[in-house]
Image (cartoon, helix red, strand yellow):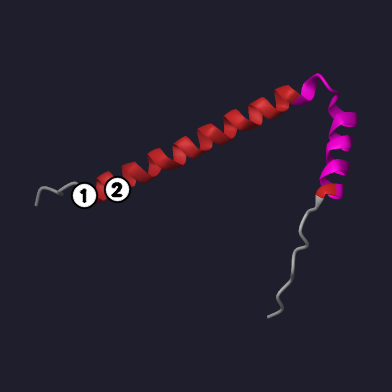
Amino acid sequence: MEIIAVPSVGWPELVIVLVVLLLLFGAKRLPEIARSVGKSSKEFKKGIREGATDEDEKKEAPTGE
């Protein structure tokens, strides 16, 4: 089995990506997109935490046998 190395992303690559995003979506739309991505990430993490606590509660709850 071969191990494939993934190159790291540096500052020049990030600047290029940001410029392309700016050209595609425009300056007014980028803050809205960033906000929605942040909210989605927050909700996802909240769901993961709630799912983990639900699983823990199910394991600890007595089955009544």
Q: Amino acid at mark 1?
A: Glu
From mark 1 to mark 2, how far is it between C-alphas? Answer: 6 Å
Image point 72% across, 27% down: which residue? 33
Image point 82% across, 48% down: which residue? 11
Q: Quadrant of residue 39?
A: top right
Q: Amino acid at mark 2?
A: Asp
Image point 84% across, 34% down: which residue? 21
Q: Residues within 10 Å of mark 1 (few under 14, many from 20)?
A: few
Q: Which residue is mark 1?
A: 60
Image point 78% across, 62% down: which residue? 7
Find numbered disc 2 in the image and state the secondary structure of the residue it sits on.
Answer: helix
Image spot of residue 60 (x, y percent): 21, 49
| Image: magenta residue range | 12-30
Dots 1 and 2: beta carbons under 8 Å? Answer: yes
Task: In this rendered view, identify the residue nearer to me: 14 or 58.
Answer: 14
Dominant SS in magenta: helix
Q: Which residue is mark 2?
A: 56
Q: For the image shown, how many numbered marks are present on the structure?
A: 2
User: Quick check: 1 above or below 47?
Assistant: below
Image spot of residue 19 (x, y percent): 88, 36
